[in-house]
Image: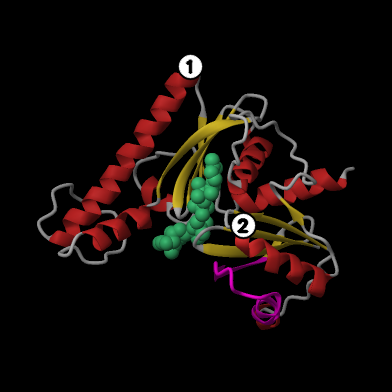
Amino acid sequence: MLLAIDCGNTNTVFSIWDGEKFLCTLRTSTEHQRTADQYFVWFSTLLNHFGIKADIRSVVISSTVPRVVFNLRVFSDRYFNCRPLVVGKPECRLPVDVRVDAGTQVGPDRLVNTVAGYDLYGGDLIVVDFGTATTFDVVASDGAYIGGVIAPGVNLSLQALHEAAAALPHVDITKPERVIGTNTVDCMQSGVFWGYVGLINGICDRIKAERGRAMKVVATGGLAPLFQQGHAIFDVYRDDLTMHGLTVIDAYNKEG
Ligand SMILES: Nc1ncnc2c1ncn2[C@@H]1O[C@H](COP(=O)(O)OP(=O)(O)O)[C@@H](O)[C@H]1O
Ligand SMILES: CC(C)(COP(=O)(O)O)[C@@H](O)C(=O)NCCC(=O)O
Ligand SMILES: [K+]
């Protein structure tokens, strides 16, 4: 069995892949101070709770936070007796090309999303991932990652308003029915929600125009369904896109 770990700037997600399906998915906040032993206490407690008997033989990691990788390596080595495959490291081969400016360190999550998107839907894709940042990854017809867009995340935008303006409270994102807010909270939610709908549509239209072709828009990340409601902004939503990409990369590297 494979343990796939997707570490974002806000949350770290662990999924166990038995070769056919994911047995479980566990989420914890991303903290670089967390040690290998702390990960194991949390992980084994939850597996016991769900009654899952996992025989983990290999580990694959994607991390947008370089500092957490050290403890995840120790976790893998000490508890599963294996050296993890870390996306973005020279020893991890990718089944697709990466065509960007020399010296650019593309976020490993974006490479994994590219691999997953191409594997599931073929080329000419835009992958939109709602995380701490919202990323748009452009996938060419041959599956290559050819660049994209990084926008402030939905929650980051709301948080920035609250932190920068004394009179603006902390609010959660929701879909307002109307654009014109008649109180502070509604005004903020409208600005971020409808502003984001414009951002997603505007960026996807411009990418398609710049590429001069039709492209499929694939979305992932917990907040994607909120934007999809009644709008059909995305052609497909796939909750486990990044995890799927990690399993594809692991299999590709095992092929030798
Ligand atoms: N279903 C959801 N509903 C509301 N907020 C969500 C949902 N899923 C994720 N979030 C929030 O979106 C932000 C990004 O989360 P996440 O996707 O875990 O980011 P990352 O991959 O960068 O760690 C966090 O603030 C998280 O709490
Ligand atoms: C853009 C990101 C911060 C998104 O990370 P996330 O929201 O998943 O935490 C991450 O992909 C990253 O650090 N990228 C490096 C720069 C680049 O991709 O060009
Ligand atoms: K992201």
- The image shows residue 222 at horizontal and vertical percentages of 47, 57
- Residue 49 position, x and y percent, is 66, 83
Is residue 51 left or right of 111 when viewed as pictured?
A: right
Horizontal and vertical percent position of residue 226 = 38, 52
Q: Which residue is mark 2?
A: 66
Q: Position of residue 12 (x, y in %)?
A: 58, 64
Foreground tag (2 vs 1): 2
> CA–CA distance between discs 2 and 1?
36 Å
- Which quadrant does the N terminus fall into? bottom right
Question: Does residue 217 lie above or below 166 as drawn?
Answer: above
Q: Say if 168 sits above or below 78 in the image.
A: above
Secondary structure of the residue carrying tag 1 is loop
Q: Give whichever of 8, 70 is nearer the camera.
A: 70
Q: Secondary structure at mark 2?
A: helix
Tell me the number on the disc at residue 212: 1
Q: Residue furthest right?
A: 256
Find out whether residue 243 is within the magenta segment. no
